[in-house]
Image (tube, rainbow, N blue to C red):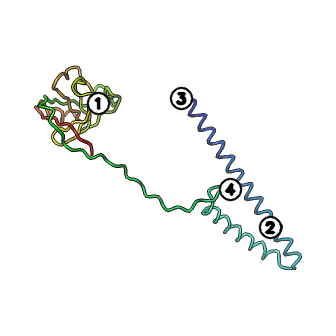
Amino acid sequence: MNSFSGKKSITGFLTLLCILLLSTTALAAETTGKDQTVNQVQSESAGTDHQTIQTETESQTASASTETVSGEIGPGIKKKATEPEKPEEPAKPVYEKGESLGLFSATAYCPNSENSGKQCRTYSGTIPQPQHTISADITILPLGTKVMIDGIVYTVEDIGSSVKGNKVDIFFATRTEALNFGRQTKELFAVIER
């Protein structure tokens, strides 16, 4: 149902775009035609050379179309004079180490090689990230809780069948990193966001 709705939106957008382009082209042709007719009448009454007038009209039309591109957004819609926008940098949260949550038994886990290249999802629905995702007992550390371990801020995004009580499972990118980490006792700290 969603893909059908998306196709209708795209089709509607393309139809609107075509109508806008056709009306702009017709308006430009109409304006150019009127200018040439007026110049022809003036040249005949003044006895001037039609070839010279036509060349001047073409150069005027070219400069007018340049003005349209720079001065208008669409037919008859003037562009507002604004200062160039500065790209806003998203403010990265600053974290500080809060109070100690105690000592936890920390183990490691990594992407499952049985998934044959598919990305696995955490219990919270996110894709696990190294130095970000940990698995914990959600009765002690609820989903979304941020904790600091060895100066790195982790977010509880996953649960594990053997992760009960004061245990955490830290996500690593590779099996080698996870095996090298092994099992360690780590002090967890609450995180204060500034």
Type of amino acid at the residue the image marks with label 4: Pro
| Residue lying at the far top of the rendered structure | 161
- Mark 1 lies on residue: 157
Type of amino acid at the residue the image marks with label 3: Asn
SS label for mark 1: strand
Q: Which of marks 1 and 2 is in front?
A: 1
Q: Do the residues labelled 1 and 2 touch (CB within 8 Å)?
A: no
Type of amino acid at the residue the image marks with label 1: Glu
- Mark 2 lies on residue: 36
Q: Quadrant of residue 66?
A: bottom right
Question: Within 10 Å of the Cα at label 1, are there few (<14), some (14-19), or many (20+) other Cα atoms?
Answer: many
SS label for mark 2: helix
Residues at marks 2 and 4, CA–CA distance in whole angstroms: 20 Å
Residues at marks 4 and 3, CA–CA distance in whole angstroms: 34 Å
Type of amino acid at the residue the image marks with label 2: Gln
SS label for mark 3: helix
The one nearer the camera, 192 or 14, is 192
- Mark 3 lies on residue: 2
Q: In this view, does 80 lie to the left or right of 158?
A: right
Q: In which quarter of the image is residue 122?
A: top left
> Residue at horizontal 79%, vertical 62%?
33
Q: Which of marks 2 and 4 is in front?
A: 4
- Mark 4 lies on residue: 75
79 up-or-down from 154: above or below: below
Dot 1 or dot 4: first in sequence order is 4
Question: Within 10 Å of the Cα at label 4, are there few (<14), some (14-19), or many (20+) other Cα atoms?
Answer: some
